[in-house]
Amino acid sequence: MTADGAAVTMQEEGYLIPAGTQSVVVSFTRLRAALFVTVGENGAVLLDGQTPAEELSLEQGKRYLLTVTPSRGYTATVMLNGSALESGEDGYELVVYGDGELSVTFAPEVYTISYDVDRGINGDNPTSYTVNDAVTFAPASKEGYTFLYWYTLSADGEEVRIDHVDAGTTGDLTLYAKFSMNEYTGEFDGDGQNEPTPAWVWWTVGAVAVAVVAAGAVTAVVLFAKRKKK
């Protein structure tokens, strides 16, 4: 406050304006607050376009723009005095009304891995990974089939073989298992006949039905015919 250009000092009872004063100017300045800043690794932070110091003096009630840029494969968490801030279109809006603490931490984003095993059984494979993980995929299995390889689909639908991901990889993945059908050979004994006739209705391996061959339980079998009952 000034009176005729001279500063007026506040007294216990308030401001005393000298008699005969022609003009009084009252101006206001924002109170300031101390903000202690902690920024973790794997990302960058700017406050109004500048790298913030570990201790800042900010105007209370003023809106500051906090820009947070995580490293590739990381996400950011921004906390002001223990409460999480939500990011807006341009960044985080920061307003303080007293001394406080700002914390920005970065953590690896978790990506999902999905598997299509075509009615088979997946191996001991992970269902998620991060940018820091290197993953080698175990083969899948399917009864009566041989596993060939895993593949993903490109943007135009082409198969892209994959057996691992290196550290530094990002993004969700869907893997498809490729199998080939097993082939089987056998010796036929038609009760002394070289060729089975329409009278023979199923083949057996001892007392086990021939369905075990199609299921891939054996690779070489001796088959015996059983005559149809009349």
Image: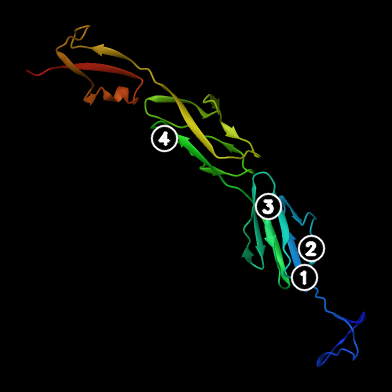
Residue at 75% from the left image edge and 66% from the top image edge: 36
Residue 117 position by quadrant: top left
Query: In terms of depth relative to the viewer, which is nearer, 82 or 27?
Result: 27
Q: Label for residue 121? A: 4
Residue marked by disc 3: 90
Please say if 165 is above or below 109: above
* Mark 1 residue element: strand
Query: In terms of depth relative to the viewer, which is nearer, 14 or 78?
Result: 14
| Circle 1 or circle 4, nearest the eye | 1
Q: Position of residue 81 (x, y in %)?
A: 67, 68
N-term mark: 1 or 4? 1
Q: Position of residue 119 (x, y in %)?
A: 38, 32
Residue at 55% from the left image edge and 40% from the top image edge: 172
Question: What amino acid does circle 1 point to?
Answer: Ala
* Mark 2 residue element: loop
* Mark 4 residue element: loop
Neighbourhood count class around disc 3 (C-alpha, 10 Å): few under 14, some 14–19, many 20 upward: few
| Circle 4 or circle 2, nearest the eye | 2
Drawn side of residue 153 relative to residue 182, left or right: right
Q: Is residue 74 visible?
A: yes
Q: Label for residue 34? A: 1
Question: What amino acid does circle 2 point to?
Answer: Glu
| Circle 1 or circle 3, nearest the eye | 3
Question: What amino acid does circle 4 point to?
Answer: Ile
Whether pointer 4 and pointer 3 mark residues with C-beta atoms closer than 8 Å, the reply is: no
| Circle 4 or circle 3, nearest the eye | 3
Drawn side of residue 1 relative to residue 170, left or right: right
N-term mark: 4 or 3? 3
Q: Is residue 125 visible?
A: no
Residue marked by disc 2: 54
